[in-house]
Image (spheres, rainbow, N blue to C red):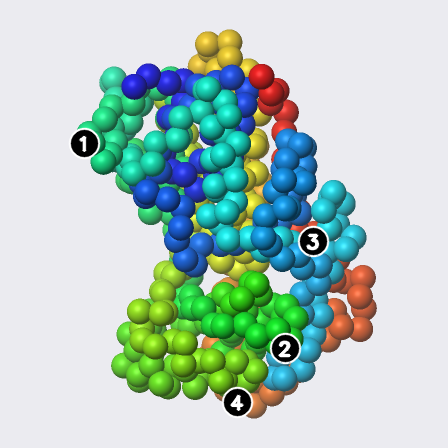
Amino acid sequence: MNVKVAIAGGGPAGMVLGFLLARAGIEVAVLEKHADFLRDFRGDTIHPSTLDIIWELGLLDAFLALPHSEITQFSGVVNDRVYPFVDLSHVPTHCKFLAFMPQWDFLNFLAERGRSYSAFHLLMETEAVETLNEGAKVTGVRARGAQGEIEIRADLTVGADGRHSTLRSSARLPVKDFGAPIDVLWLRLPREPSDPGQVFGYIKQGKIFVMLMRDTYWQCAYVIPKGSFAAIQARGIEAFRSGVAQQAPFVADRVGALRSWDDVKLLTVQVDRLEKWYREGLLFIGDAAHAMSPIGGVGINLAVQDAVAAANILYPALSARRAPDLAAVQRRRTFPTVMTQNMQLLIQNTFMSRILRADTQEQAKRPLFLEAFKHFPLLRRVPARLIGVGFRPEHVRTPAV
């Protein structure tokens, strides 16, 4: 198979880039190793700056017709006291809310629109295994599909295959690992109509518990010290259920939905960044270029913004049959990536670590910075801007054929 661009990974970064390039008439093959996009515990947040991109593509009405929920304000509950700290109603975007939508619906939406372009090829059950090389230049990708091995020749290969990127390992590019003192346990609990509205997180007794509202269930993140999952398992599932009920008492009657440890998934948190995102014929974007912490749920937004910036920069050269300036993509996206990771590292290495190791007396103290958000509503616009828009929002500059 011969295409202009081969993209490994059918996540948000790969699908958005594939769609934008195909929309501009650049022949693209997107490789997705699974048979579908249905996987639990993927990030489901669609941020205002991502919604702006969908609006710029003229697809917002169709997108928002899909089942989703919209959140404008977030609060936290610390030692049973409620603290509002995010207000998105003033962000400078078309949609002033955060949309929660299962990621498989987002990806299926892009796939359906992409298939309307003859230049878009989505290869499901096709996993990128390694790059094809001619000397120092990458000339495509070798993949494994349902029918066996396939070689895809491409002028440009893009690694968008996530934090455990196979292509990144194949390319052997140096990585800066910043470490993380936390891991996250993902779980799902039933939701009742009488439940309280969206509250971002609960902090009590040295524990952090985040709940994201869905139509019929809560997607929950239980933050734990790095490497402590085995010790938690050793105490038994019943003790874990009790810990969940202690954090959010209104779900105490439903923690039995956690029947076994099979209903609890470990996310090993990592924060890292490639020193160089490219080599001749090869580019990395999204988590493959920079693994993000789950703090703020901004990983999807960063991946989508990477894809839009890459499409804007790559399109003129690809359409003119010239070698694209891959370094320009890294230059464009380094600032927002570094700033976002620094913000996440500050929060997880100071605030979250201190909570997880705090003694009972310290836990009882009122958090002064959250008190400030409570009494001075204007302050809530700052985290709203950082979470909802980010440090460098991108806009669609590629044409539609």
Q: Is residue 283 left or right of residue 128?
A: right
Residue at the bottom extreme, as displayed: 361
Residue at the disc numbered 3: 97
For the residues carrying marks 1 and 3, which lies nearer the camera in this image? 1
The residue located at (55%, 53%) in the rendering is 101
For the residues carrying marks 4 and 1, which lies nearer the camera in this image? 1
Mark 2 near mark 1, Cβ–Cβ under 8 Å? no
The residue located at (52%, 45%) in the rendering is 106
Residue at the disc numbered 2: 194
Label whose residue precedes the other's in the sequence (3 or 2): 3
Q: Give above or below for 350 relative to 320.
A: below
Label whose residue precedes the other's in the sequence (4 or 3): 3
Label whose residue precedes the other's in the sequence (2 or 1): 1
Find numbered disc 1 in the image and state the secondary structure of the residue it sits on.
strand
**Which corner quadrant of the image does residue 287 belong to?**
top left
Residue at the left extreme, as displayed: 148
Q: Is residue 271 left or right of residue 90?
A: left
Q: Kindly identify which numbered label has been placed on residue 360.
A: 4
Label whose residue precedes the other's in the sequence (4 or 1): 1
Residue 302, given in percent of the width and then of the height, sits at 54, 44
Find numbered disc 3 in the image and state the secondary structure of the residue it sits on.
loop
Q: How far separated are the C-alphas under marks 1 and 3?
A: 44 Å
For the residues carrying marks 2 and 1, which lies nearer the camera in this image? 2
Find numbered disc 4 in the image and state the secondary structure of the residue it sits on.
helix
Label whose residue precedes the other's in the sequence (4 or 2): 2
Q: Kindly identify which numbered label has been placed on residue 148.
A: 1
Q: How far separated are the C-alphas under marks 4 and 1?
A: 58 Å
What amino acid type should be assigned to the residue bearing mark 3? Phe
The residue located at (52%, 89%) in the rendering is 360
The residue located at (33%, 47%) in the rendering is 164
The quarter of the rendered structure image containing the C terminus is top right
